[in-house]
Image (spheres, grey):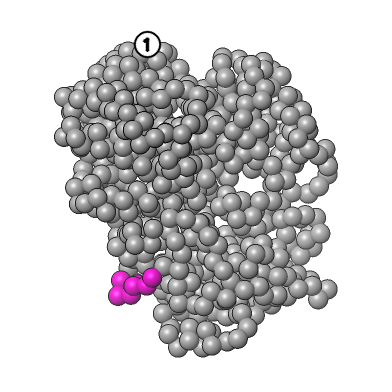
Amino acid sequence: MRELSYCENPLVYRRRKTREVKVGNVGVGGDNPIRVQSMITCDTMDTEASIQQTIELANVGCEIVRITAPTVKDARNLEQIVKGLRERGCNVPTVADIHFKPDAAMEAAKWVDKVRINPGNYADSKKFVIREYTDEQYAGELNRIRERFSPLVDLCKKRGIAMRIGTNHGSLSDRILNRYGDTPLGMVESALEFARIARDLDYHDFIFSMKASNPKIMIAAYRLLVARLNELGPDWNYPLHLGVTEAGEGEDARIKSAIGIGSLLADGIGDTIRVSLTEDSPHEIPVAKALIENIDEMSGSQLSALNSQLSFDPYSYQRRASDTRAVAGIGNSGLRVKLGGAELIRVVVRQANFDKIAHKIEKMGDYKPEIIYEDAGIVEIDPRDETAIAKLNAERSPQFVTVRDDVDLAMIPAFRLLAAKLHSRHPILLKDVLNCRTSAAADAAEKDGVSQKHPANFLETLLTAATNIGSLLCDGIGDAILVQGEEAPGQALRLSYNILQAAGSRIFKTDYVACPSCGRTLFNLQTTTAKIKETTSHLKGVKIAIMGCIVNGPGEMADADFGYVGGAPGKVNLYVGKTAVKFNIPEAEAVDRLKDLIREHGKWVEPVYGTAALEPAS
């Protein structure tokens, strides 16, 4: 795939140029700003609640609102919802979210400004059957899809409304899985099959998405899609909707969303975004806005005169092949810590921050710092300095290398340039920000007339660190990380480990995949997720998926050990991997039955109470 190109220059921020697609009165793509959208969570048949939730989202800055339409009856009620919104002076564009039901899509398209369809299940059965297809059978399937999909395209074209062709990693069809596998390529080809039908009917008001719960897969799929669109020609310049599905809630979900969405925005990819949180929908909007605002600050043009071959394949994850090196560990015991190669990606702190928490290191368990920056013999260089690079590359033994703090470069391009020019045997330390000093140093600098920007709040710090470090980790770059944009050492350590966890680079605690709520959800996701976490959060390295319905369940649980999925109102199905093993369990019993299932598979351990967790230090 290396001959394909997903951006003009990976060292320079330049937003991808697309055509404009109008969603109601809001333009997406073209010269428009990156748009923020979300989804209401109530039953679509509850007209008043749907209106109120939509207005609440619009009032906090949501520019496009999506509403699920799981049946024709729900789709028909969209007329009343839209009518009520307009009567109350709310003109926010509405989108119908469709899965499995072409008839519901046809009804919804009469009332809304945009219809979202999922190529994996628009014309396919609910339970996918893996089978072999001959070329003739495959062509027959495409003809069947054309017959089911064309009427919707014609209606959208007639009404002048938009469409999102939204592929989800968790719901690829059996046809796609057979031919392309459960891969980013399969996601892209699934969307292109539907796009070709739309184009054959001279319909172009559509937007693509390539969502996944795994940021690495999501990033690779979007890059590959853009590369394929570039290959197909300049008139394939359709806008993109970005999102990480089933991100969950709290700090972990914000980090995972920043890794997936933020890194693509930093590459110039994306025209509208939705941050999916298992929380009340208005909480998604500040996160999305902050991600967009961060792009201007993180995307410098200082490398515009430079170009370099990437050191990694942007469409397939592989960790950079550095050599192993031992450096001084924490304390006076003479302990050496190995990094690079196949070793764990290490967590580094500055001496000043270590001194603040040294008295409670023994109580930190798995969350403690592993390397002190000043003791590790780290070589700091400007990646544009050819002489310094040549000197390092002439060294016979692997050196521990990072970008100097006084370098005036955007973070992601700076480390990509370093990885491209530095021999791969040298391990690399990633940083979240450069030009970061202590408060005392910053105050002194400001007295001397040198301005020093501090993050406005922890959300900004978190999103910046997750975008910069997480993006590079997903590129395969990095053997250790240093979060220095957050002054509180305990908080910086927690952020470091959570970024490694969200990027799938180092699993040190229970991992959760949890979808946001919507009108399809068959139980209260927020309270259920909290209850499951309370019961299982001590299971280090176990991955649990919590899904409100079957739409993305089996696929998004591909990497999960266990799944908790709404099967019917008040009933839950339990999964091991992609396989449902327990059916129609009453919701009141389901968490205990999940615990029993984990025990049956040898992954349950009893919690040990009294162990100190990582606490923010002042």
Q: Is residue 11 left or right of residue 447?
A: left
Q: Identify the residue at horizontal 42%, vertical 37% (top origin).
A: 176
| Outermost residue to the top | 73
Q: Position of residue 331 (x, y in %)?
A: 79, 71
Helix, strand or loop under label 1: helix
Q: Position of residue 298 (x, y in %)?
A: 40, 61
Magenta stretch, main secondary structure class? loop
In this rendered view, identify the residue nearer to me: 604 or 36.
604
Q: Which quarter of the image is occupied by the N terminus? A: bottom left
Q: Report if residue 522 is visible in the image.
A: yes
Image-quadrant location for residue 103: top left
Q: Which quarter of the image is occupied by the C terminus? A: bottom right
In this rendered view, identify the residue nearer to me: 39 or 10.
10
Q: Report if residue 22 is visible in the image.
A: no
Q: Is residue 337 left or right of residue 560?
A: right
The question of residue 304 being in magenta is answered with yes
- From this view, report whether residue 448 is shown above or below residue 241: below
Q: Position of residue 158 (x, y in %)?
A: 16, 24
- From this view, report whether residue 46 is shown above or below residue 273: above
- From this view, report whether residue 583 is shown above or below residue 349: above
The residue singled out by tag 1 in the image is 73
Q: Identify the residue at horizontal 23%, vertical 33% (top origin).
A: 198
The question of residue 614 being in magenta is answered with no
Q: Identify the residue at horizontal 64%, vertical 55% (top origin).
A: 506
Q: Is residue 434 left or right of residue 118?
A: right
Q: Position of residue 36 (x, y in %)?
A: 36, 40
Q: Residues within 10 Å of mark 1 (few under 14, many from 20)?
A: some
User: In the rendered structure, which segment of residues is drawn in magenta?
Assistant: 302-309
Q: Identify the residue at horizontal 81%, vertical 47% (top origin).
A: 611
Which amino acid, by three-letter code, is at mark 1?
Lys
